[in-house]
Amino acid sequence: MTEIKVIPLGAGQDVGRSCILLQMGGKNVMLDCGMHMGYNDDRRFPDFSFIAAEGPVTSFIDCVIISHFHLDHCGALPYLTEIVGYSGPIYMTHPTKAIAPILLEDMRKITVEKKGEANFFTSQMIKDCMKKVTAVTLHQSLMVDGQLEIKAYYAGHVLGAAMFRISVGSQSVVYTGDYNMTPDRHLGAAWIDKCRPDVLITESTYATTIRDSKRCRERDFLKKVVECIDRGGKVLIPVFALGRAQELCILLDSHWERMNLKVPIFFAVGLTEKANNYYKMFITWTNQNVKKTFVQRNMFDFKHIKPFDKKYEENPGAMVVFAPPGMLHAGLSLHLFKKWAPYENNMVIMPGFCVVGTVGHKILNGAKQIEFENRQVVDVKMSVEYMSFSAHADAKGIMQLIQYCEPKNVLLVHGEAEKMEFLREKIKQEFKLECYMPANGETCSIVTPYRISVDVSLPLLKSENVKHNALPPNPKRPRVIHGVLVMKETALCLMDVDEACKEAGINRHIIRFTSTVRLEDPSPPSKTAEKLLKLFQEKLQGWSVVLTDGSISVESVLVKIEGGEDEQKNVYVSWTNQDEELGSYILDILQNMGHVAS
Amino acid sequence: MMLDCGLSVHTALNFLPLPLVPSSRLLNLPSWMPRESEGSQLEGELKECCSRIFVDSAPEFCPPLDKIVDYSELDVILISNYTSMLALPFITERTGFKGVVYATEPTLQIGRLYLEELVEYIEQTPKRNQAKYWKEVLHLLPSPLCDSFKPRSWKQLYTLSDVQASLSRIKVVGYDEKRDVYGALNVTAVSSGYCLGSSNWIISSDYEKVAYVSGSSTLTTHPRPMDQNVLKNCNVLILTGLTQTPTVNPDTMLGELCMAVAATLKANGSVLIPCYPSGVVYDLFECLSSHLDSSSLSSIPMYFISPVADMSLGYSNILAEWLSNTKQNKVYLPEEPFPHAYLVKTGRLMHYKRIYSDGFSTDFRQPCVVFCGHPSLRFGDAVHFIELWGSNPLHTVIFTEPDFPYLDALAPFQPLAMKAVHCPIDTSLNFTQANKLIRELKPSTLVVPNAYTQAPSAHPHRSDLVIDQESRYVISVQRGEVVSLAVKRHTAKVDLCPILADKVSGCEVRPGVNLATITAGLLVKDNQHNIKEWADEGPSGKRKKLTRPEDCLRQLKYEWGNLDIDQFVQKLNQEGIKDAKVERSNTGFIIHLEEDTLIQVDDKSTHIYCEAADRQLRLKLRNILMQCLNSF
């Protein structure tokens, strides 16, 4: 038995700061390298000292895989490569490689320039870090080294999001990153083949939710926005520049077009246009619909959505503003929130998950007053709405993925402990699978059966086929295979006995027995043979009994009749040692009959 | 398994062009009849232009040879690139084809553009008559018509619905993606560097590897570079798709093209470049625009006219993952990977579906550069421009696509005053590159078309324009020929169940070599083999009743080595068989025992003759013998 070890450095019974260490077949792989948005101290980065207390991490980790561009999955990467000093291979998809540095830079600016923190990574470090990244394409089998192989699958969570299958020899693990099993306005649904991994490491953000239909949620969202602007209120939608933002923009833009609405929609400048450009260029990563129509009309050229300017925030009257970041923890969205929160006409719609510690998380939990670091207190009178638009798989989706890939074990990460507990029971019940949910820093060892691969000589395999008259094999009913396993050092090869002797360089020693029985039968020898043939066929059901040139053969047993037209016949029975049982049985038959009944 | 299915469009050269507007010149060409012919059925089928004979009919194309294989029995078709799939609808539609077609995403998308363009070109200029009698009198016709290959198998083009149906059978693969074929084989597409999404294929089983290399390039243009590493050390390398213009260098040609364009434009003439809707044309946009800039001709408009021009320009800029590194890095900025996106934005490059599309006639000004199809000059908007400009010596037509001999393409338009320049740009491997590649890949067996083993007929003394056949096994193939590839499979990989493995105890026959006889259950599912423990069917109960044949195998052991005759006789003595008389024979020994019992011992065998009644004695002998022999 061999073990697969999984150690979450982040995202163990927790959302945010995804970073999971995988040990399998002597290889160490880091899955994601995220940052925790709720912390401002050392806790925001995974505890890399866990990997190698002092020594270099490069020699310990064989590769780092980043599932998608969200900072809670890639935010600590520059820290790992430029400060901790990891210099081994890093893999991510092309869109992730394109977009991640933008988000990293954006976060760096907020942290360093707005919050005035020192001791953070620099712009140059982000650039240097990205240079070390190898971009992968979907379904490409990439050999990291002689044994370690990775393969990316479409995950549908954001542009370029991927699930990864990691395999070493016969062992394999699938890591989902964040994924979404229902196609949305611009992305397709996650897909994986029946790859039967030993362990499926899946996110479980919405472990207990079964989301209502997508269309209902969209209708709800539009209704709330329209109600608010009808009463002259301002709608603030905190979003990350890439991802949900594009989907909501498509939704609002087409609604505005259809209803001929005139209230302005703004999108925070800078990132927007660039972000939409990424979507245009990586359109192959969006869904079929967007792909099909992009030449005529690119979905990401919005008609009603204008760039936001700082001076608009003082404008009276209704407006809708998309502002980053998504969890109201810094930047423009927080700034607008402080301004608009005290008025009950206004509304904030939180379209995604918020980590503990962020303003977003507080107001979603009903906080009516928010106190900031500089003792500023803001009353929250605006209405606060939560719309689950963040594209994670819900409980149904997670179960569906398990069904798709048929894992032997499931391991939950990226979720809250109680919810995981619930899902774990459900998985155990429905699929009868072992399900794990290690906490951060906890090592989870999963035992997997080892598989032994042997070579079989084709003549042997084919002779088996010939024996069964080339009948197609029945996958449920085994057929017998008989041969000799030749073991030379580590090479194992099953072959026919004569081939094996040749391969081993030895001579077989064949033992043969011949015994004579005297029979009384007045018919000519050929007739006697026919009679015996009939008798044997009757007694030896399931064996192939053949008559050739007056001799009867069953396997290696040969029965030969000698004698003239007279009564006395000599019957010779001859067989090899291997057919002793059969040979003596046939001899018994002949001895017991004495004379041939006619 | 079928490797590629290209269409031979050459046959179209034998037909008259299909102009968009009726051309009085073409209509008034004299009919031609063979002198010996008497039938009037041939009337009007053949026309003569400048002593060349053309068929006046809707053009026909030569699909792959049928009747050699039954298309309904094909399991898989592997497509290398979008130029080698034009016959796909002929193979997959109405033939009973039930298999799968594998191609990369760009191959599918751009291949769709090629197919749709071809169909549109033919359908926008329908021809009522379909000539067929000329095929009956082939021997009476002048060259090159009389040399036509199997004209009766030529077919009219498929329809758009055939194209859709056929393309819907394609399953998209990525580079380096292993696709399982019925559990028996793996097929993998690897980058070939020739055009967007172009691939070579690796077909492999557990121990055997066949590489199919077609349409590859080691030059640096826009596609992802060729992946050579994975092609190394295969059992068989099938190599085809080498350059069609082995004597010219594509870079030089590109330079000459730029010069010719600039010279014509400076003289106030316009340039027609017949082209396909994708491929080298992207490089032409890029190089030509920068050359015009440096020749202070930046104000000259470039027109790209094709029913799929917009799609082609659009798709090329979203396929970043399939591009060269330089182009790929641009999308990280994010900028469009191809400069033609910028040329379109700034109005330098204008694209239209057809010459009669909205806006073209108002935008059109001369001098200009027009890119449009079809390179055969038999259909498509290029026919119109040749007719329009043919009589003016200021204008130039430049042939870049190597697929058609340019003089043949121009033949039905003669006499022509317009200049014709031949700058074929074929980025495929040339013979020097191919020979170098083969040396590096070291295949055990090389398979090439017969044509590559002798110097081209146009250059019979260029012995450098052949594939080296020294120091390796080369099989050359010809159309319609069946060859057997020299791949012999010896072993297959099988999973051995660990429970069974634990019970296997080997017997060391030589240092480091162990043998163990195994009788087990073999499970076969999706061509994957699994060896498990052979399940007991329960105790067979009564003695005397013989067990099933399979169960007999279970306890088997095999004896090996020589029998030590002295040891054997000694053992016989110990067991009370004292009267053994040993006698030397030619090949070994004969041991006589009481009565008729006799043991014949040779190097590799021992034969015991014994009366049936002496069962006890026989079993005793057997026992002793087996104690004296090694077994596994």
Image (cartoon, rainbow, N blue to C red):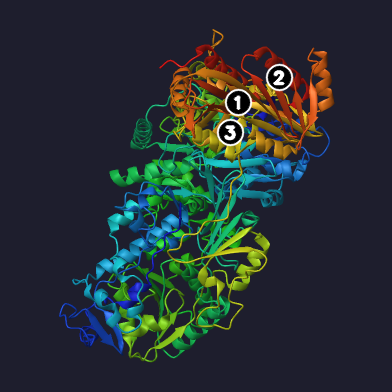
Q: Quadrant of the C terminus of chain B?
A: top right
The chain carrying label 1 is A
Q: Can you identify the residue that label 1 sits on? A: A574
For marks 2 and 1, give the CA distance: 14 Å
Specify whether residue B260 is in view. yes
Dot 1 or dot 3: first in sequence order is 3
> Closest to the observer: A442 or B119?
B119
Q: Can you identify the residue that label 2 sits on? A: B622
Q: Residue B585 at what x, y percent from top left?
A: 77, 34
Identified by mark 1, the residue type is Ser
Specify whether residue A201 is in view. no
B594 relative position to B520: left or right: right
Q: Residue B57 at what x, y percent from top left?
A: 24, 74
For marks 1 and 3, give the CA distance: 59 Å
Q: Can you identify the residue that label 3 sits on? A: A174
A120 relative position to B258: left or right: right
> Are discs 2 and 3 both within one chain?
no
Q: Residue B416 at what x, y percent from top left?
A: 35, 90
